[in-house]
Image: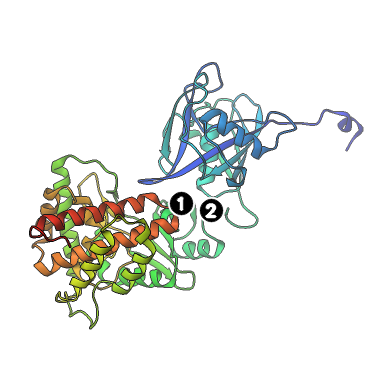
Amino acid sequence: MTAAASTAPRYQVPVDVHLILRRRGDHGAEVLLSRRAGDVYATGLLHLPSGHLDGPHEDVVTALVREAREETGIIVDPADVRAAVTVHHKSPGGSSRIGLFFEVRRWEGEPWIAEPEVCDAMDWVRLDDLPGGMVAYCRAGLDAYRAGARFAVHFQLSGDDIVYDPGADRLRLVPDAIGPASGSRPDAAVVAFAQRAVGAITEWTDTSWTREDSCVWRVRGAGGGTWYVKVHQNDRFHAREVRALRTWAVSLGAAAPRLVAADAGLRAVVVTALRGRPLHGVVLAPGQECEVFCRIGALARRIHQASPPRPAPVGSGPAVGKAARHLEAACSHLVPGDEEFVRELVRRAEELPSLEWVETHGDFQLRNILCDAVDGSVAVIDLERSEPGPAVRDLVRLSDAWASRPDLYEAFLAGYGRVLTGAEEAWLVIDTALDAVSGVAFGIAHGDPEVVERGHRTLARLRAEHLRNSPVGDAS
């Protein structure tokens, strides 16, 4: 270092913090964006909630918590702040800065526009389908985050615009020396397994279903292909899904994923991506709904006819042993009369004939059924609960979708090609009640009020239907 250099002012850049407030939406991960307004930089453009440090006394986590409260009104516990990615950015005007992007998945309150003088809109957007009109710097941070990078450089040129332009994308990811970022993509062994199967992967997007501790990523290859990488919770789920993908799912063609690779040691699979979006939460016109449910019925029939039916194993039936355990866990949270109703259903099960066994999906509900908006075709995903059983096993959770819509049930049966037998209808009520109790027990244990509410709603519906169909005076 020369004497002249030692006396020159040390180069300094501003440090700012960016909040990636993340939640699980109906179609995958979502992040909160706000639109800048007033006499501020990039007015009219979308940006993450963000800001500068107040001074040398404030650390970056404290600054993020403060900015979250000031801009969105939410309360963030510093312990819930996770480092996401750091971006060294230079604007078209030549000034540069260091941006620290932090992920937060848990907070108190609902976000709202707390600073209307600098923000005139705020909304949740899909992480895998970011909108136009974003500040290029912000978009660079989110793209680096989606790719699982820890550090990125985003140096814009003098002729660039401050709004994101895919034709002038200056993002450059800096390779990670110690492996992928925690929480953004799987560990190094799973990454290596996936890349052996499909080649170099340039983008990882977490699409996990948070309620069930699932680990699923949508990945994009260097050559443009798209696949899903899934790590199962346990060996049983892994074995079930691999078996289903290698047997009955093959007969469905484009209506089910295709297995690309599996590793039992990692409990991981790579499967093809399917067209369409999950039907959970999708609003359709009445005519469209009936057509979709007719196609769902036809899909269920194809699954159940994938192999010849066989007699039920001796002693098979509803999970009576599990019913007792679930009732014990849930009884203090049930409505008066629910426990007696379920125990009576279990007693009646002993008098019913066994049903033939077929291939079943095991978790056949709207969030696991995709619908293609172009041609209306339907497909099924998530086969980890697949195993042989009575066909009505696949109607248990789907029945919640037509609880107050007999037209949808009729449409399903039309696609299925037949009505249920009396024994099947009786078993369906029993299995649905047991599933509802199981849901209440699970929801209480895991702090999931939505699952608890669904269980209560299902039991109330079943009891009401039972009373309507019972002779006068039957109080069972």
Query: Real-space Cα distance between discs 1 and 2?
Result: 8 Å
Q: Which residue was labeled with disc 2?
A: 183
Residue at image location 29% in from the left, 59% down from the top: 436
Q: In this view, does 339 lie above or below 182?
A: below
Question: Which residue type carries mark 2?
Answer: Gly
Q: Do the residues labelled 1 and 2 touch (CB within 8 Å)?
A: yes
Q: Residues within 10 Å of mark 1 (few under 14, many from 20)?
A: many
Residue at image location 49% in from the left, 65% down from the top: 193
Q: Which numbered disc, 1 or 2, marks the residue that appears first in the sequence?
A: 2
Q: What element carries label 1?
A: strand
When asked about the image quadrant of residue 65, the answer is top right
| Depth check, front residue: 117 or 381 | 117
| Depth check, front residue: 75 or 220 | 75
Point out the image quarter for the C terminus.
bottom left
When asked about the image quadrant of residue 141, the answer is top right
Q: What element carries label 2?
A: loop
Q: Could you tell me residue 62's position as x and y percent?
A: 65, 37
